[in-house]
Image (cartoon, rainbow, N blue to C red):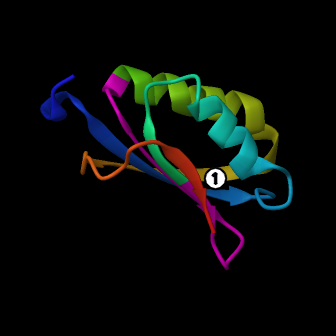
Amino acid sequence: MSASSRQRREVMYSGRVQGVGFRYTTQGIAARFDVTGYVMNLPDGRVHLVAEGTAAELRAFLREVNDALGQYISNAAENALPASGAFSGFEIRV
């Protein structure tokens, strides 16, 4: 896949998103998609997700995250950016 076909999505999730297995569930979902990046808890109680992949993979991945964890999410602020190519897999950061 060419680097130019890859995109980046950064999503800030708020709600009851810490202490509910959000990061581990997200990492498990990511394993089923061709995406790279990370998910991490923030000190203010939000969760920050960064994912890179094709537009279609990102849409499907983020839809699956919302389907699995939507009951905990009160807001998801998403930004679309160019892919950096900096990630080799999808990890949980602390």
In the picture, the quarter occupied by the N terminus is: top left
Secondary element type, mark 1: strand
Is residue 12 visible in this depiction of the protein? no
In the picture of the structure, the residue carrying the numbered disc 1 is 75
Kindly indicate the quadrant of the structure image that contains residue 92: bottom right
Q: Position of residue 39 (x, y in %)?
A: 58, 54
Q: What residue is drawn where x is 26% and y is 46%? A: 85
Q: Is residue 5 left or right of residue 56?
A: left
Residue under the image location 43 percent in, 40 percent down: 36
Q: Is residue 46 visible?
A: yes
Count of numbered circles on the image: 1
Magenta stretch, residue numbers: 39-55
**Which residue is most to the right?**
20
Q: Residue furthest front?
A: 88
Using the image as rendered, state which of residue 20 and residue 3 is in the foreground: 3
Q: Is residue 41 a member of the stretch shown in magenta?
A: yes
Q: Residue 30: which quarter of the image?
A: top right
Residue density around tag 1, few if under 14, some if 14–19, many if 20 or more, within 10 Å: few
**In the displayed structure image, the side of residue 6 where residue 79 appears, left or right:** right
Q: Nearer the viewer, residue 70 or 39?
A: 39
The quarter of the displayed image where residue 17 is located:
bottom right
Q: Residue furthest toward the bottom?
A: 43
Q: Percent x, y for residue 64?
A: 63, 26
| Looking at the image, residue 74 lies above or below residue 42 | above
Disc 1 marks a residue whose amino acid type is Asn
Which residue sits at x=33%, y=44%?
8
* Relative image position of residue 66 (x, y in whole percent): 66, 34
